[in-house]
Image (tube, coloured by chain):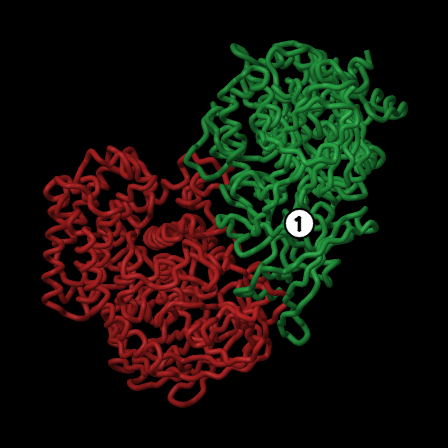
Chain colours: A green, B red
Amino acid sequence: MKKLCLVLFVCCNISAYAQKQDYPIQPLAFTQVKLADHFWASRIETNRTVTIPASFERCKSTGRIKNFEMAAEGKGKFCTVYPFDDTDIYKTIEGASYSLAVHPDRQLDAYLDSLITVVGKAQEADGYLYTYRTIDPIHPGGAAGPERWMKENENSHELYCAGHMYEGAAAHFMATGKRNFLNIALKNADLLVQTFGPGKRAVAPGHEIVEMGLVRLYRITGKKEYLDLAKFFIDQRGKKAYNKKSKNVWENGTYYQDDKPVINQDEAEGHAVRAMYLYAGMADVAALTGDKQYLAAIDKIWDNMVGKKMYVQGSIGAVGDGERFGANYELPNATAYNETCAAIGSVFWNQRMFLLHGDSKYIDVLEKVLYNGLISGVGLDGKSFFYTNAMQIQDHFTHPDIERERSGWFVCSCCPTNVARLIPSIPGYIYAQNGKDVFVNLFISGTGSLKVNNKALQITQQNNYPWDGGLAFIINPASAMEMNLKIRIPGWAQNQAVPSDLYSYQQPLNKKVEIKVNGKPVEYQMEHGYAVISKKWKKGDKVEMTLPMDVQRVMASEKLPDDAGRVALQRGPLMYAAEWTDNGGKAANIIIPKNTAFTTQYEAGLLNGVTVLKAEVKAINVDTAKQTVSTENKTLTAIPYYAWANRGKGEMMVWFPEEVKFVDIISR
Amino acid sequence: MKKLCLVLFVCCNISAYAQKQDYPIQPLAFTQVKLADHFWASRIETNRTVTIPASFERCKSTGRIKNFEMAAEGKGKFCTVYPFDDTDIYKTIEGASYSLAVHPDRQLDAYLDSLITVVGKAQEADGYLYTYRTIDPIHPGGAAGPERWMKENENSHELYCAGHMYEGAAAHFMATGKRNFLNIALKNADLLVQTFGPGKRAVAPGHEIVEMGLVRLYRITGKKEYLDLAKFFIDQRGKKAYNKKSKNVWENGTYYQDDKPVINQDEAEGHAVRAMYLYAGMADVAALTGDKQYLAAIDKIWDNMVGKKMYVQGSIGAVGDGERFGANYELPNATAYNETCAAIGSVFWNQRMFLLHGDSKYIDVLEKVLYNGLISGVGLDGKSFFYTNAMQIQDHFTHPDIERERSGWFVCSCCPTNVARLIPSIPGYIYAQNGKDVFVNLFISGTGSLKVNNKALQITQQNNYPWDGGLAFIINPASAMEMNLKIRIPGWAQNQAVPSDLYSYQQPLNKKVEIKVNGKPVEYQMEHGYAVISKKWKKGDKVEMTLPMDVQRVMASEKLPDDAGRVALQRGPLMYAAEWTDNGGKAANIIIPKNTAFTTQYEAGLLNGVTVLKAEVKAINVDTAKQTVSTENKTLTAIPYYAWANRGKGEMMVWFPEEVKFVDIISR
């Protein structure tokens, strides 16, 4: 049983029952990929050995586990801050389960069982599980209201807790084959099915994720009611009476993606994490039902997000007040919010968009998020986290939303536990398959084991990505086989900084990416961003591809006033930043003149090994004693954006002026 | 009859009938003051000869007069933009009437009569007068709704139009003794009395002013229903259901000063002009009814405004989106809105607060507004206007709310016509009286003619204010009389930059202001900010007072982040600004180091004559060709704030850095 489950485990498409209708493309489960990648394997190991244990420790020390114990006893006082604090336990169990699946650990396995027992005891007889209410059904005049799901549309997060429970329980079941957590989740889901639906209660979930969670349970059980309920919940959006004229996003419903029915929505709006989970849930339901209206809506929303609302390092959710998307082109640097959870949600959604459409542009965004604005959310130590991901840090500028250094935990600690569950799943984003079409999406060394026409096929990647552009893929079919190898040629390697006109390269690349098979250049067709090599593959066939690793000067659309006249630096998939510590104590004073030449250098001892960029630039210095201001030549050192804030706190810049037209004098 | 009316004319307290209860202090009507003041007489003359004629011309050329003609004919299409465009005619008639009262002009008198005839023809049979609806009773599905006063709470401005009509009609009656406009107004007011009140319709006027207008009609007619209706309208506020949790000021009612009953309001909030007119109306009603709850409320609101929401040059209404007060301490320089009408409203309200309380702090604010942020709203040419009054202009910074140069007129032209009616009334703010107490509030040369115990008293001021601090007052009673002369000693002459801790002087003044009577220093008592000299006054007694005209460095409360580390310059009642044209083409690059010495110089040929400030300062310069930044010594020339933007457009600063800690590089 256990083994069967492992085989069936698919990263975001956990199917125990074959679905008649589903994503045309299926991802290769991360369990089928054995990493040998310097960049990611070390991060996954840190997540396993540091992040997950630290996360459990903090769930205990902050009282999150005690909440379950009190709920079981039906007495006490909810002892943490947020009604959704239960989810941190569910999410850490999910991450630990992913970890267990590829790295057996009897002690961890037993600990999960003990936790699940505590969780199960907190469940009410009919399946309801939400410690905030169960501990003290009287007190929640506040966040949850006197009756169940009464304030779901406001801030009770009851269905949000359920959704994370389902995600965690599904992962635990698929990783261990044990049904202890799954049964808790199913009992809860059955209560939802009894309670909500046509002719029963209706609510638009306040913080989406229950939709994705129900789909996971549907994939495991084949119970169509779960899928139907997911769709029912999605279709409840846009029915509440809001004041459409109001500019206040809570008043007009956009904060909740609730201002109009989802099929009429065309803009990435409101709370960014909620938005990502909704759009990912819509993709799931669209894949499983063939709903074309959902598809049309999320296609439009994606175009809006990537064309008008995404930072250059892939982050989303610019506005701190509401942790939300701003207006089109509202991407301020000084106050960028960029919640880590939103980046994680963007990975979920973009993977699903790829599985629907087979276009590499979704993976271009996914890769950008993954290598930049997502992993910036966790320190190299694996136990310090950013809730927000800044675009610039200036000594003189403070703002309540801006974090200058990572924290071990947060009162609202959604991001650390989301990191804990995302990192171990990354191998599941590398490969995907549609019959004889095998997609290579990410360039991560190691071996993926697929089946094409029921015949085994191994693909081994050998590279030093993202530092080097030279990639090799060794193709090992069990025996010779026809197969279409579809290797993603990243947009960034083809003059497309992003799949929109929001950002672009100042100097276009002219070379076509060259691909060799067994040492000989081949002509290849491009299909939706993929180089397609169709042939009869033999054991040991070697494909080589060299991506251009030039340092690119990225400029922003003129519609982004904060970036006008500025340049950002990119090399391969990585965006770069200048930190104070490499640049004489300051970074906000750097000007990168046009035509400055860059050199690159891999520094093994720096930040767990990074390629740094160097260039001769100018800087403006203030002598506060003499009260003079002057310009000097200096050498810029830039590091990958994801690695900032691992050496103390100080200035950091992503967008650099190319020339100086004025200065604003700051006197505080 | 005409003469009687002129004698009865009191600037803001037009009483034909003695009221049992009224302001304890009564202002001396501006008609009783003959100016001989370089500063103000020339402005009033420009207003008479340029502003008023230009205003009438524009009322005609923009179609505002045509609207009345079409309403009279009951056909056509409202041909201007705003439903309240009628008020520009009422306001210009008001200004022209003030002008007529002191400067007879047969041609102007006849023109007013012809206009009033046009206005009268537009009035409906029952007294209703609002061209927007009368022209086409069907069309106003938009701003006014299908029925009268249906959308008063939104944007119909029907009662706003009525209020300005009453103010204009009262002024015209008092100036000319003619009842033609007054009768129109009374007929309209009678319709309001029939329509609104206890047991009848109730509405909180959407844009206040009808309350003040009704009080004016009450003072002329003694008809108590007008006063009662003014109070009824004020008491309707705070009864509509708003969403109190919303942060949106339209949604939560604060935009309209409608979130709670006025007696519970304690913060200057919402649309700043609406707010001033409401608070002034409350003061009127409080004075006439003795309502202590109104008094308590406006006292608190005043403390809030002056303590937390007023710019250093007296302007209010910081936020452009809604032309409104921001939060406490929300006084940004870059985007300051500061509508000219709000400054005018502040003069109305502060005068009334003084009349209630007899405290000079209200006149301190009134003087600050008058000499700075109000008259900045009109160009020296008398025919160019600022709708908003900027706090800083930087070449590189643009914002839709920021005006860099004055305009001849606006689509919404409330400010120019408000200036036209305010300027000629200024002599009415100089003197006030409570029995034997005679207040000298403003230092404006000329002669005021009062009566103390029915005996004539003339006070002649001889000064060169605001340029010189030496003031002389010649007291000429008809015969020797006991009288308490109360001369305001401005807060600014006593270490109080404003009557709150929002702004203060860096270097305190140590001298007590010296007063001489007939050449001999006298000891005087201070009462509520007034030097009181009680004696038996004889013809030709001469009082001399010398105010310190040191250049003061003003600093802001630390709660104002935009001003932290910066200094503003004040001399006498005037705030100063640096304009590009006197400072080598730029102003935003100036640093005024601590301890810099200032020199002053009166320049008769500059800006109609101004005292300029000069000092050795530093500036930061960008060489855009060489791309270098450097610091240089230079001479600052600062001009009075009110005089900025009369010589083309360029940079302007009020708050200057005292030292440089950082610079922000601007590259666009």
Identify residue for label 1. Answer: A550
Residue drawn at x 65%, y 29% is A348
Which residue is farthest bottom?
B519
Q: Is residue A171 left or right of residue A301?
A: right
Q: Is residue A220 left or right of residue B457?
A: right
Q: Quadrant of residue B317?
A: bottom left
Taking depth in this image into account, of B542 and B249 the one nearest to the observer is B249
Residue drawn at x 54%, y 40% is A309
Vertical order, B92 against A58 (above or below): below
Q: Position of residue B177 (x, y in %)?
A: 13, 61
Vertical order, B297 against A235 (above or below): below
Q: Quadrant of the N terminus of chain A?
A: top right
Vertical order, A433 against B539 (above or below): above
Say what amino acid the circle numbered 1 marks: Asp
Taking depth in this image into account, of B262 and B340 the one nearest to the observer is B340
Residue at disc 1, secondary structure? loop
Q: Position of residue A469 (x, y in %)?
A: 71, 43
Which residue is farthest front?
A520
- Counting labels gives 1
Q: Residues within 10 Å of mark 1 (few under 14, many from 20)?
A: some
Taking depth in this image into account, of A655 and A114 the one nearest to the observer is A655
- The chain carrying label 1 is A
